[in-house]
Amino acid sequence: MPTTSAFKARVPGNSTSSRAGKISSIGEVDFGNPDSIVSFVQGRWDARDQFRRGPEEEWFYNIAACLGYQWHVWDKRRGKMYLPDAPSYRVRLVCNRLMPVIRKNIAKAMRQRPWLTVVPATDEAEDAMVAQVGTKLLQYYWRFGNMDEKNLTAFSWLFMTGNVFYRTYWDPAAGQELGFEEEDFDLLGPGAQGQSKGQKFGTGDLAEDVVSPFEIDPDPNASCLEECAFILHSKVRSLDYLKARYPKAKELRGDATGDTTISKAVATPLSRRRISTRCSENATSYDSGSTPVG
């Protein structure tokens, strides 16, 4: 996962939130208590702006220049790109020489497709067969996951912001849906007890997403990703999506503070709307890989 010095510029020791009632240290989190995890994530979310203000300003300048908005400037007070006023006689000539360079770099990066292979652990025939199966499995998921198109998106983020992330995880909602009768629940383990007859379960499958740097909040005490005790991944989702994905969740409501529509701001830097838009129909979902390292 490529990174730059944008995350290294953070000052160690400032990773805590000063707000009362919020857990500020990963060591204080009780992973058996959902309220403790929520308190830590909310505290990190409230404090993230003080660490991301500098890098995000640089990223938006790069994206604006790449898309041909060279005359836009960053408003530190409002936190958005805007076009300053100018006399009517002034000609704002735009000569975008950055976009061809980025496209050339993307073409070079994607010119040779990676070849995925699994190396046998030993010279035995059984390990050789396992390696062949593993190689075919990797090639299948490369096609099934549409990685060629995802790499195009990833390289675009990389060459415009200097940062991009791949997230590989197990998606329990993916795969084929299977229906079970009540007598079959005993085979599914104690977690399936109390389910209704005919309820469908997903078989699950591997998934991989390209994550932009706007969605990642690493441990500010770390100088590189390998030293992070936690990484917070936040993404804006509609309430309809969350209700469909998590049907057992109750009292879902829109995000009161916003931090929404980052993708819209990236796609249209000319927009007069603030990056962190207040919207009652959106909510921010958090996914924290907050297991301590080591």
Image (cartoon, rainbow, N blue to C red):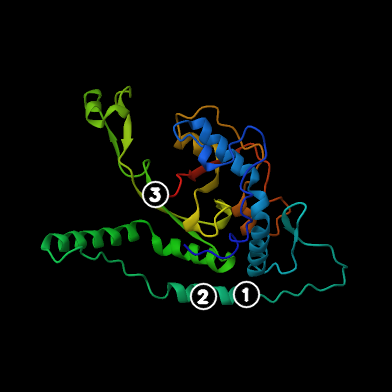
Report helix, strand or loop for mark 2.
Answer: helix
**What kind of residue is marked 3?**
Tyr
**Circles 1, 3 touching at the beta carbon (< 8 Å):** no
Front-most of residues 150 and 18: 18
User: From this viewpoint, is residue 102 visible?
Assistant: yes
User: Residue at (63%, 32%) from the top-left corner?
Assistant: 21
Residue wearing tag 1:
98
**What kind of residue is marked 1?**
Leu
**Horizontal side of residue 255 vs 138, given as left or right:** right
Front-most of residues 52 and 107: 52
When the figure is inspected, residue 251 is found, relative to residue 71, above or below; the finding is above
Instruction: Give the mark nearest the N terminus, 1 or 3.
Output: 1
Residue wearing tag 2:
105
**Horizontal side of residue 130 vs 31, given as left or right:** left
User: From this viewpoint, is residue 283 visible?
Assistant: no
**Horizontal side of residue 196 vs 217, given as left or right:** left
Label 1 crowding class (10 Å Cα cut-off): few <14, some 14-19, many 20+? some
Report helix, strand or loop for mark 1.
Answer: helix
Residue wearing tag 3:
169
